[in-house]
Amino acid sequence: MNSNLHERLRRLGVKPGREGLKHAPRPARSAFNIESLVDGREVTENGGAYFVAETSYPPDHRHGSRPLADVLNSDSRLAARLGQHDSLAASDLSGLAFFDIETTGLAGGAGTFAFLIGVGVFESGQFTLRQFFMRDPSEEAFMLNGVAESLRDRVGLVTYNGRGFDVPIAQTRFDLARRPFDLSSFPNLDLLPAARRLWRGRYENCSLGTLESAVLNHHRTDADVPGSLIPQMYVDYLRTGDAREMRRVIYHNAEDILSMVTLAAHILEMFADPVSETRTGLDCLRLAMWHDDNGEADEAEAAYRAALARARSLPADHKPALYSRYAAFLKHAGRRAEAAPLWQKWADLADDDPTPCIELAKYYEWEAGRIAQAKEWASRALICVTHWRKGWERDEAWSEIQHRLERLARKE
């Protein structure tokens, strides 16, 4: 948390840890308190209280281009692979909890409070979203009890950057409040790594807000607020008790969770069927690379073939990746003759990369036994290196290719 925000919280009586929270003052009374602005209720327990907003959606509620229930038709084995947790493979995905927090700082650490925690679950034939709100810091421990109870029977979490942000911060708050709850042990299907696999470089960024617009075709209303403003809004709320901006923060949190539901369905569907007619050439390439990296040869080749068939629609700056990755896949499988046309396509696009030319020189020398063509490709590789800046890398590559040409000359 930045020093200015930390100092403002300190002046309000907010300190890290349970002891510092006990005596923090309640927000000033205001005609715009949270109870009058947001549908919800006060929960009281053991002398403490907190506020929870609860909203239920029918399973066919559409968020963007998809109904919420689409995620329930996804393959749990694929969810286990993307979440890197085998236990999800045998789980009913209706047992997942969609989890997102809003905090007093964006950097994390022990001084960062999670003042709003959203938990969305499928139950009783509906999708129910509960948003646990800390009206003042003295309510934290009681609010965390409510969060823990809502998660107790869940088989895992779905988050967006939850491994790096939401879960560590929430776990720290449980620990500091002396509320034993091992949130970090939950299987966590964090959608951000998969989203980056699929969409990095295609859009301005891979933020949830960007993808819900570009991928899900969902657009938020003017009630939304930029996430970067949320910490200061909460500090202002603690000072004034005016919850009008908190109503916008609660909307923002709800939108994040609903987007996670339909984005999870979209991502799982893409990974489950990488060669669907609805996939673009770039979709197929990204999915092929994922299967390839995971050693799933059949799935990888099917997706590479689909990407190659749709290469015309592939952005020009991604075509070298298609040809190089698919050729490397075929080479690894001992199918160099099939890789040769791909190396040639790659060479035609790569003026300063000698790699495809060298691969072709090797192929024609050792596999096809056509020395003249091997020399031709080695010579092209040498031309590529001439485009490099002078230095040891250029000298080393030049020497290696020159040695190859000398050997080929002796074979003629």
Image (cartoon, grey):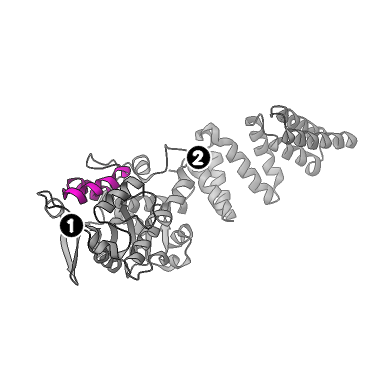
Determine if the magenta segment contains residue 172.
no
Secondary structure category for the residue under label 1: loop
Q: Where does label 2 land, which residue?
A: 281
Residue nearest the observer in this picture, 151 or 22: 22
- Judged left or right of residue 41, residue 287 is right
Q: Amino acid at mark 1?
A: Arg
> Residue 131 in the image: x percent, y percent?
24, 57
Range shown magenta = 224-252
Q: Where does label 1 land, which residue?
A: 26
**Would you place residue 42 above or below residue 320 in this image?**
below
Residue nearest the observer in this picture, 44 or 194: 44
Residue nearest the observer in this picture, 290 or 146: 146
- In the rendered structure, which disc, 2 or 1, sits on the residue that comes first in sequence? 1
> Residue 366 in the image: x percent, y percent?
80, 43
Sort mark 1 into few (<14), some (14-19) or many (20+) by Cα contacts within 10 Å. some
The residue depicted at 27 percent of the width and 48 percent of the height is 8
Most prominent secondary structure in the magenta stretch?
A: helix
Q: CA distance from mark 2 to mark 1?
A: 56 Å
Sort mark 2 into few (<14), some (14-19) or many (20+) by Cα contacts within 10 Å. many
Determine if the magenta segment contains residue 231.
yes
- Judged left or right of residue 202, residue 149 is left
Q: Amino acid at mark 2?
A: Gly
Q: Does the rendering let one see residue 366?
A: yes
Residue 68's disc is none
> Residue 254 in the image: x percent, y percent?
26, 51
The residue depicted at 72 percent of the width and 40 percent of the height is 359
